Structure formats: structure tokens, C-alpha cells
Image: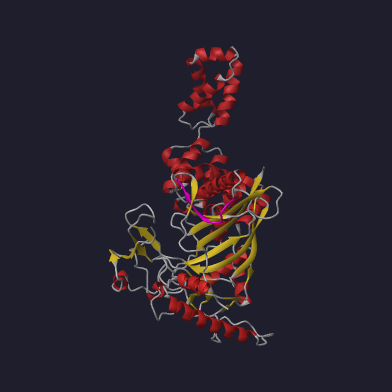
Amino acid sequence: MISIKEVEHVAKLARLSLNDEEKLLYTQQLAAILAYFDELKQVDTAGVEPLAHSLAIDSVMRADEVIPPPGAELLLSGAPCRQGSYFRVPKIAE
Amino acid sequence: MNYEPVIGLEVHAQLKTKSKIFCGCPTDFGGTPNDHVCPVCLGLPGVLPVLNRRTVEFAIRSGLALNCEIAEVTKFDRKNYFYPDLPKDYQISQFDEPVCRGGHLTIAGKKIRIHRAHLEEDAGKLVHAGAAGLHGSEYSLVDFNRCGVPLLEIVTEPDIESPEQARLYLTELRNILRYIDVCDGNLEEGSFRCDANVSVRPVGQKELGTKSEIKNMNSFKAVQRALQSEIERQIAVLEAGGRVVQETRLWNEATGTTFPMRSKEEAHDYRYFPEPDLVPIVIDRKWVEEIASTLPELPEQRRSRYVSQYELSPDDATVLAESKELSDFFDAALSIGTPAKAAANWLMGPTIGYLNENKLGFDSTKITPENLRDLTAAVEAGTISSTTAKQLLLEILASGGNIANLIAEKGLVQISDEKGLTEIASKILIDNASQLESYRAGKSKVRQFFFGEVMKATKGKANPQIVNKILDELLTQNT
């Protein structure tokens, strides 16, 4: 089971601000999800390789070659705030 | 009470690839901010990272050089945290299946165990406006050029017992990575960075004390000083009956102390989970063997070869092997017939002196192995004095040239003509009657004065052995 406190903690880590109603709702929904995992745990997985990815492919890699990037101007054009060639962000800490 | 420190180090080594770890952007240092950036390293929606094969190769290469076990299967995970230098709000790193595990390296006879080495991407660079640091700054500027640059994080076990050992470990590790050509080890440009974990405990106690993590050290000397300062601080806390708090502290080079970093997030709770955009990597044993077969001689092997093959002292072998370029040159000079001892002396003394004085790396000098062979041969044959040879060496280091030509052009040939030197020496004895008097009165040190005068008169070109022989004869005759 999961407590409201844990939901508040996870919400804080994820930078989500939740009202009391939402906290209650998510606590119930997360509890249901976790309960489903408990159900999954009952499956006998002896002899089954752990799975880190849902695709049955591995070892996709590319050669170490430079692809010229589009340049700062284009990428900065979508920025809400810039200064010169930098992205500008609000105050980080007091 | 007596305390002992327990130290573990984490090194972030930038891998020398042309392109970033998950996209094709260049890894060049500097450049216009945000010019080496694309939608992948900015984490824009809908992009797909693809792993750079060379980063895995370099991780394997490093693991082999550090005696690690290379994983059969390795995978990437997301390490989640919020900070403006991280555009995706997670860093792609490796959590439970790193490329390398369980190695070691040896410094001064002591084995330092390596816990693991894993691949990850670097973050961007922040410039805090209107303040010296983060705090008090009204806003910050972000340059993502470094974001996605491949790093190998190498973590030791807590095996290091002193700040001096920490420095030795870092020196050796950097050396190894440079020898195997996976990292340029440039501290100024941040391609070799170190964080330290340190705790203290009463001597004899088994359990570890509470540790702190120290960051922001920009040189090996700084690591050594920061550890010393932190060890002293922790001991003082314990002696005063207090408790060490587990925290991250920053080193301040100017004050020579560490201070607590205000935490950017409550506790470290990175909520790692497998990176769904990257598939697992199966590391074929044939690939590992191939890489192993191309590993060059490592610093430790080279040092012991210098001791056993050329009878150099262990200290001399260490000095020579510390720079791969310098010791490659040493080997090249020996392979064309330069005597080992002489080559070692010319390289360790005047050459390293010249490099340190001018803050240069060996590869920026103009000297060739043939130059060193010709120089030592000329000294051996008595053609030039060692004083002249030293001047010649410095000139060759700076501007290059041909030893035989330079000797001829500059008239540097040593004067070994006994008759001529006897005439010069006799005249000096006559011209300096009072010194001769005191020499006869028993002041044997005056002999050095006469020697110096002969050298002065010949502009340093007189063969010192012959001058000594002549002085012996003349001074005996005159007594």
C-alpha cells in the first residue's frame, strides 16, 4: 500500500503541485497499480531471463561520426528566454 | 585519540570521441554557446538517442587496463533530477549493469580496488549572472555544448588511506587513460574531474565513520589539500563530541576549506529506471579480445621494464613513464642506439626542467630521437662539454635542428688540446698570484677558482677532465 505522504514525496520530486483531492485520487490509483504488481509477482518466473526492454533487439549502435548540428540560432529560436547565444533561466536558488 | 581517514574517489573521464554519446554533435571544447547542440542532446520531444559504439569500445578498453570484469550485457538507465544544466530532467547513465566491475590499479605497491566504471552523458554548463556563484544570482545562462559528451565514471572502493595516496591514484589513473588513448586528461578543460568521499574513524575501529562528499576540486593538488582539510575538520568535530553529518561539501581553493553545499533536492532520490529509448548492449567476447589485443604497454609495465632492462632506479623510471609522449620518445631514442642512462638523464633533468619552466607538454618540443642520440654521442666522444650540450639541448627543444651542424656553425667544439689549455692555465696562475699564495697556504678551495677562470677564458668549451688534469700538474709543480 502507499500513503498520502509517499505520494506527496513523489509529487515533490516530480515537481508536481497537487491539491488535496488530487492527492487522494492519485493515492488510490497508485495503490491499484502497485496491487497489480503484487499480482504479477505471483507468476513463477524461475528460468526466465530478466527483461530490461520490451523490444527483442539488442546492441544497436552507431559509428562515431559527427553530424553537423543545426547551429545555436535555430535551437534558440524556440527558447522562451535567451541572452546572446545562451538559454536564460530564472533564479535557481535563493 | 588517533584517527585514520578512509577515502574513495569518483573520477569522471571524458572519452576522446569525435561525436557525443547519443547523437552526432561534435565534442570539441568551447565554441559558441549552444552551437554543438541538436534536438537529441536538448531532449526535445520525439527524438531517439543512438549509442556511439566507440564509447563502449573505450569503456571496455579502460576496463581491461584497470583489470575489470567486462559485462556480458550492459544497459542504460535514467537518473532523474531537476537542474537547469540537464535539459531532459534526467541524465542517461548506468545503474545496475555497468560496462565494468571489480578492477584494481597499483600505486607504490598498494592495490586500490575499482568498484565499477560506467558510461554516462555530461551535463551542460551554467553561468550565474550578477554573482560569483549560484546564490544571490538573479538568473543563469545555460550552454548545452557539453551536454551529451561521453563520460566514463570510475569509482574506487574505500581503499585509499591518505590524501597523498589519493593524489598518486589520480596521477596513475590519468596516466593509464592517456596511455590507452581514451581520455586526454586535461584538467583545465574538465576532461578529467574528481569527487571524493571521505570519513574518519578511530584507529582500530572496523566500522566506517559518516562520510562527506567533496566536490569542486580542479587539480590533483586541490584534491590532496581538500581531503587534508576535510579530514582535520571531521576529527575536530568528533573530538569536540559532535557528529559528522553526511553531506556534500564544496572545496574553496581561496580559503583552503570545504563548506556545505546547499542541497538542490531533498535527499538523493534519483528514481532510476531502464532507459526505454536504448536497447541493451550485448558485449561479444570476440570484441573484448580484439580490444585486449590492441592494448599498449601500460605505465606499470613500462616502469618495471625500465628498471629491469635499463637498470634505471624506480624513481627515475616513474619520472620518465609519467608522460607517455616523453617515454615513447625515450624508447625511440634507445631503439636507434642512444645509451639508456645518458638519455634518461638528459630527459629527466634539463628537458623536464625546460617543459616545467615554459609550461609545455613534451609533444610541443622540436627535438627528434636522432638529436638526442647525436648529442649523447658528442658528449661521450668529448667533442662538446656537458655545459655546451645542455645549451644545445635547450636550443633543440625550442627550435629543432641538427646537432653536428649546430656544433660546427657555433664553434662549440670542446677544447681538448692539452698544450693550449696548459698555456691558458699557467697564465691564470701567474695573473692571480695572491690566490695562488692562499692555495699554497692550505686553502684548497681556491682550486675551484682557478678551474672557473680557465672555463671563463675558454667560454665554457674547455674539456673539464683535461683542465683538472692540467691544474693538478701545475699546482703540484708550483708547490
Where does the N terminus of chain B fall, quadrant-wise?
Answer: top right
Q: Nearer the viewer, residue B313 or B162?
A: B162
- The answer to whether residue A11 is visible is yes
Q: Nearer the viewer, residue B353 or B185?
A: B185
Q: How is the image coloured?
A: secondary structure
- The correct choice, above or below, for B195 with respect to B372 in the image is below
Q: At 51% across and 61% down in the image, what residue appears? A: B13
Q: At 50% across and 32% down in the image, what residue appears? A: B415
Q: Position of residue B430 (x, y in %)?
A: 50, 15
Residue B59 lies within the magenta run: no
Q: Position of residue B96 (x, y in %)?
A: 59, 72
Residue B250 lies within the magenta run: yes
Q: Nearer the viewer, residue B134 or B361?
A: B134
Residue B201 shown left or right of residue B194 in the figure? right
Where does the C terminus of chain B fall, quadrant-wise?
Answer: top right
Q: Position of residue B289 (x, y in %)?
A: 63, 72
Q: Nearer the viewer, residue B430 or B350?
A: B350
- The correct choice, above or below, for B39 with respect to A37 in the image is above
Determine which quarter of the picture holds residue A88. Answer: bottom left
- The correct choice, above or below, for B263 with respect to B230 in the image is below
Q: Position of residue B205 (x, y in %)?
A: 70, 51
The part of the chain drawn in magenta is B243-253
- The answer to whether residue B373 is visible is no
How many marks the image carries: the answer is: 0
- The correct choice, above or below, for B293 with respect to B479 in the image is below
